[in-house]
Image (cartoon, rainbow, N blue to C red):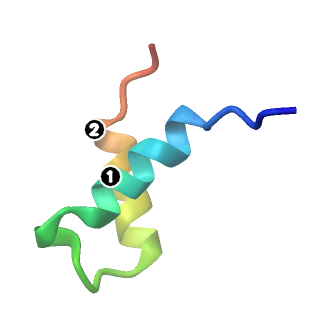
Amino acid sequence: MVKKNNPWLDHVKKEKDKPENKGKPLKEILKLASESYKKK
């Protein structure tokens, strides 16, 4: 069975990889991600 990627986790990973978010705690990144995430 192929595991489908979770769109929310994909979004969080993208936010985490942004240069301006390097070294920020996960809590901060989740907060930023929740502001910029739009449910499809």
Amino acid carrying mark 1 in the image: Lys
Quick one: which residue is furthest to the right in this view?
A: 1
Q: Secondary structure at mark 2?
A: helix
Tell me the tag on residue 40: none
Please provide percent x and percent y for residue 3.
75, 37
Up-down relation of residue 28 to residue 38 (above or below): below
- At horizontal 30% and vertical 55% (from top left) the residue drawn is 15
Q: Are marks 1 and 2 in contact (CB under 8 Å)?
A: no
- At horizontal 42% and vertical 52% (from top left) the residue drawn is 12
Question: First in sequence: mark 1 or mark 2?
Answer: 1
Please provide percent x and percent y for residue 39.
45, 20
Please provide percent x and percent y for residue 28.
36, 69
- Kindly identify which residue carries mark 2: 36
Amino acid carrying mark 2 in the image: Ser
Up-down relation of residue 1 to residue 13 (above or below): above
Instruction: Indicate the quadrant containing the N terminus: top left, top right, bottom left or bottom right.
Output: top right
Quick one: which residue is furthest to the left in this view?
A: 20
Q: How dense is the environment of label 2, judged by Cα within 10 Å: few (below 14), some, or many (20 and up)?
A: few
- Kindly identify which residue carries mark 1: 14
- Give the tally of numbered discs: 2
Up-down relation of residue 11 to residue 24 (above or below): above
Instruction: Indicate the quadrant containing the C terminus: top left, top right, bottom left or bottom right.
Output: top left
Q: Secondary structure at mark 1?
A: helix
Quick one: which residue is furthest to the top in this view?
A: 40
Q: Nearer the viewer, mark 1 or mark 2?
A: 1
- At horizontal 23% and vertical 79% (from top left) the residue drawn is 22
